[in-house]
Every structure is written in C-alpha cells, then in structure tokens.
Image (cartoon, helix red, strand yellow):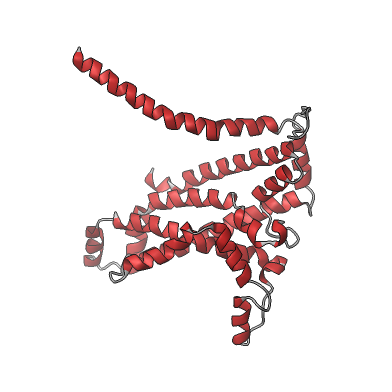
Amino acid sequence: MLQMTVARRKMLWAYIFLAIPIVFFAVIRIYPAFFAFAMSLFDYNPLAIDQPYVGFDNYQTLLAEMNKPRSVTRAAFVNTAGYIVLGMPLQLLIALAIALMLNEIRSFATLFRLAFFLPFVTSTIAISWVFRWLYQPQFGLFNVLLKAFELPQQPFLNNPKQALASILAVVVWQGLGFAVVIFLAGLKHIPRVYYEAARVDGATRWQTFRNITLPLLNPSIVYLVVLQSISFLRMFAPVLAMTDQGDGGPLNSTTTVVLRVYREAFQRLNMGYAAALTVVLFCIILLVTIFQLRVTTRRTN
C-alpha cells in the first residue's frame, strides 16, 4: 500500500511538472492562434469601440490583392517564396560543406567552430545595420573594394534586382553557424567503422559521402530543413533594418509577409486584415512543414 502511494505521488508530481509547459504553450501559442483567426473575421481596430463582424471579407480582400500584378501583398508572398526557395537550400549546402571540412581538422577546431557560430548569436538588427553600411553606394566597404580592383560599383540595396539577393546573403551567412553545429553533431554520431569498411572496399570519397554520410545525416537534414524553412518564411528583422524606412523596398522588391502584417497591424491599425495574413501564413508554414517531413523522411520508411 505504501509503495502504491509513493508511485502515485511520483505520477502526480510528474503530471504537475508536465502541466506547467503545456499551460504555458497553450497561453503563449495556441490561444493567440485561435484569437488571430477570430480577429480575422472582424474589421478589428484596437482604438475603436465597435468591432463589426465582416466574415471572410478580409480573406476576399487578400485574394483580390493577390490577383493584382503590382500589389504589395502579392509582392510580399512572392518575395517570401523567393527567400525560402533560394535561401534554405543554399544555406544548408554551404553549412554541410563547412561541417564536413571542420569534421576533418584537429588543430584549432574549436576556434573555427566559434568563428562560424558567433554571427548566429549576434543581434540580427546589429548585423543588418553593419551590412547596410557595407552595401552603401560609393562609400560602402564593398564598393570601395570593387573600385580598388577597378570593377564596376554596384547599387546593392538601392536596386530592385539586387536588393533581395543582398539581404538574402546576410541572412544565409548569419544562420550558417547554427546549421554547421547541427551537421557537426550528426557527423560525430556516425560510427567511424563504416568509413573504415568503405576504405577497405575501395570506395571513393563521393561514394562514401553518398552511401554513408548523407543517409546517416538524414535526421539532421530533416530537422534543419523544417526549422530553417520556417525561419525564412517568418523573415522580418533583416528587411526592416536594411531597407529605407523599413518599407521592404526598393519598389517592394524585398518586402515579406511578416513585414506586411506589421505594417497593416501597427501602422494602419488594420488588425483584421493583418490577422488574415497571419492565418494564411500559418497555413502555408503548416503545409510546407508537412510536405518537407514526408519528402525528407522517405528514406527512413
């Protein structure tokens, strides 16, 4: 009887400790998600007394904006798609190459890992402002170097054709450290005996990488693909800090969905439409995550 009582006490305390993060997650994550959906059904203005119910009018407005070739909302979704399609694969490929090289070195390995990880833990706003200065026409460091080598200077952030790539380069560089650490952790868990057996069998480096390293890194790849994709879909701070007046310019060439939500909600106080944008972005993130999980984990089925 005493043993049962002790066991029940342990179980009770376990449920109590588990309930704390569950309640926190429900209050911080789940409730705001449902509240955002409810808000999207109203012409919500925090400064107004009445909040008229409009049903799905905000979503109809969003759909109409998407059908306009030069609308800001359409540009935000197109740019966000560009960030993830270009940025996520590029970041993971570079990070994997760096991790493979760092895994082979023995001298100053910790120093190199620290050098790659430092940008990730540095303030995004601070990094964005530094690169904004580096990208400055004529007097920015990059253009000074181009002039020194007698190469044509570039407008970078002032050109709609170069602005998105310029911001994307900074985001990819800053996030490399996290991806490198995850890949290194995955590489460390691959038994060395597999590589020794492959070397005995006469396998080339490419065959070893394709048949041993890549399949056994699948859990790390799945984790990074999902996490970094969500990060690119929610990109906000670099665009806000690196563009003039944080408007996602020039000519809306760098604006994102999250920046659009910020502008509608806190500048125009159009909370209902901003909530509709948030709900649509949430659905896109959910669908992209499910698709990526099904595709990237196919090898392990």
Q: Residue furthest top?
A: 1
Image quadrant of residue 55? top right
113 sits to left or right of 284: left
Location of residue 107 in the rendering, given as x and y in whole percent from the top left corner = 29, 71
Look at the picture and state if 142 lies above or below 226: below
Residue drawn at (77%, 27%) of the image? 53
Give the quadrant of the N terminus: top left
Location of residue 185 in the rendering, given as x and y in whole percent from the top left corner = 34, 55
Location of residue 101 in the rendering, given as x and y in whole percent from the top left corner = 36, 68
Location of residue 286 in the rendering, given as x and y in whole percent from the top left corner = 56, 40
Give the quadrant of the C terminus: top left
Front-lying residue, 64 or 173: 173
Q: Residue furthest left?
A: 2
Image quadrant of residue 29? top right
Front-lying residue, 52 or 102: 52
Front-lying residue, 161 or 19: 19
119 sits to left or right of 273: left
Q: Is residue 248 visible?
A: no
Residue drawn at (60%, 86%) of the image? 148
Residue drawn at (32%, 63%) of the image? 208
Image quadrant of residue 147? bottom right
